[in-house]
Amino acid sequence: MGVAARRASVLVVVALSGCVSAAPPGEVIDDQAITIASFDFAESELVAEIYTDALREAGFRATHLRRAGAREVLLPALERGLVEIVPEYSGSALSFLGGDATSDAAATAASLDALVSPRGLDALTPAPAQSRNGLVVSAATAARLGLRAISDLGDDAEQMSLGGPPECPERPLCLPGFERAYGLTFESFLPLDVGGPVTAEAIKRGTVDVGVLFTSDGNLAQGDLVLLEDDRQLQPAESIIPLVRKDAVDRFGEGLVEVLDRESAQLTT
């Protein structure tokens, strides 16, 4: 497949999703390079860039397809060979594919590898770094309502608005999960962003009462937001873990895996 045809194929997959952005204008996929695709939020883009830089430093030709879309887009693109690597989150990827994710990082990674292997993919060694979904409120709201854990929201949730990723109402570990595990029914849901900057600002401004942020979000260290404890352990292990096409390993050699594993080992939260 030529460069133009391959890039067009990725954009067709993106366009068919109907809900994600295309690759940045002018970004070309190099057929002779390893293409790493990131999800449409900043943390994923940063992680993919780290892996891309590591491969380049090791002598590989590597291309980063930035903010290529959501999981509904990137996993099919990976399976079809339109990209070679997608840095994933173990629990969410496993749940998305129909598996049962748990808080055990090693077991979740192993289950994911077993599930993707028949699809022509390998789940490599998970990084120590994890980034789970979390419910966050302002420090003022936490103090006013005595909130420490998600279960503390209780009936108050019925008078509260929730903000977060647009796909949250459909994702099993987002709104449906909070309803199932905690019995929470929010008054309304406001679709915001994936990865937090807009959501964090909406919580601070009072645009929403509760927001879905990653537990690794830097905004949580500033003191004006409170991450509620997941006291019923809804969220599984969410190790950063590269999904790689088996034929890419065959094509580029085991050195590809060695570089990715070495870089993963250095990713911590």
Image (spheres, rainbow, N blue to C red):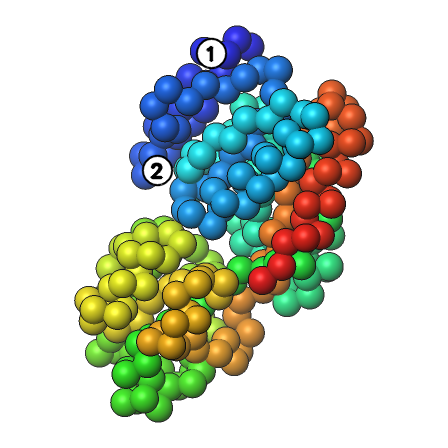
- For residue 244, the mark is none
Q: Nearer the viewer, residue 55 or 251?
A: 55
The alpha-carbon separation of the residues under discs 1 and 2 comes to: 20 Å
- In the picture of the structure, the residue carrying the numbered disc 2 is 20
Q: Is residue 164 visible?
A: yes
At label 1, the amino acid type is Ala
Image quarter for residue 154? bottom left
- For residue 5, the mark is 1
What residue appears at the point 50 percent right and 45 percent down from the top-left corner?
46
| Image location of residue 176, percent across then percent down | 41, 63
What residue appears at the point 53 percent right and 39 percent down from the top-left corner?
49
Q: Earlier in the sequence, mark 1 or mark 2?
A: 1
Q: Is residue 3 above or below residue 33?
A: above
Q: Secondary structure at mark 1?
A: helix
Left or right, 38 with reference to 110: left
Q: Is residue 225 above or below residue 191?
A: below
Left or right, 138 with reference to 227: left
| Image location of residue 264, percent across then percent down | 67, 48
